[in-house]
Amino acid sequence: MSLQLYYAPGACSFVPHAMLEMSGTAFESTSIKLHKGEQRSPDYLAMNPRGQVPVLVDGDEVITQIVAILLHLDAQLPQTGILPAAGMARTRALETLSWMNNTVHPTFTHVFMSQKFTDDEAAQKAIRAFAVLRYRELLGEIESMASRAAPWMMGEHPCAIDAYSLTLLRWGGYAGIDPTSFPQTWALVQRFAALPALARVVEREKLQLNVYQPA
């Protein structure tokens, strides 16, 4: 198995990046600098015409979209525990992963990239303001989950849900939301980031967990 992950530091690609490092499996990682427009280069667009990260190359196969990538890796690397193996635990993890990807993540997109939804500057400002309020509410739902963590989001073993929680809470800082105002989630993501495999990913991506700056 030959695996190569294309990721952008601090993006949602952190989740498969973290899972690959946790697996102990050899893989190559390539950083795509979004602020430099590397996702729009001809070579990258030939691989992923949508110009998004993450991209996973497994042999001759190119896989895009975070949920598809995680499910593929989970099937290939079952010993990692990317998601619970079976039963209601797996169902709940898939439920949470889908919600994070189709609801929480797009809400942050409305904060960070409001220009995708309108070219009217006043409307962009209104979209951002409303999305920040909604994003805070969604982080509150994650906080409720973290308060029941035992000790991780899905039980005894860290998994993709913990990695996505770290990413989403970290993004809150860019929306002007102090991550420490969600103490259960903040404690969980710090424990997660301190795991040896995760510490390597945090270092490779040069991540600062708390990017919040008071006004």
Image (spheres, grey):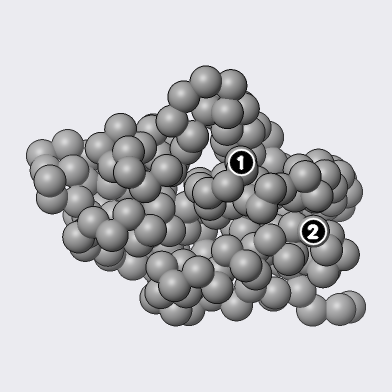
Expressed as whole percent of the image width and height from the top left, the position of residue 2 reads 13, 50
Residue drawn at (82%, 69%) of the image: 180
Expressed as whole percent of the image width and height from the top left, the position of residue 178 reads 82, 68
Label 1: how many Cα within 10 Å (few below 14, some 14–19, many 20+): many
- Asked whether residue 173 is in view, the answer is yes
Residue 59: numbered disc: none
Q: Which residue is mark 1?
A: 154
Expressed as whole percent of the image width and height from the top left, the position of residue 122 reads 83, 51
Q: Is residue 96 left or right of residue 160?
A: right
Q: Which residue is mark 2?
A: 184
Name the residue nearer the viewer: 60 or 74.
74
Q: How many marks?
A: 2
Q: Secondary structure beneath disc 2?
A: helix
Residue drawn at (21%, 46%) of the image: 57
Name the kind of residue labelled 1 in the image: Met
Instruction: Name the image quarter holding residue 92.
Output: top right
Q: Is residue 104 above or below residue 172?
A: above
Residue drawn at (33%, 43%) of the image: 79
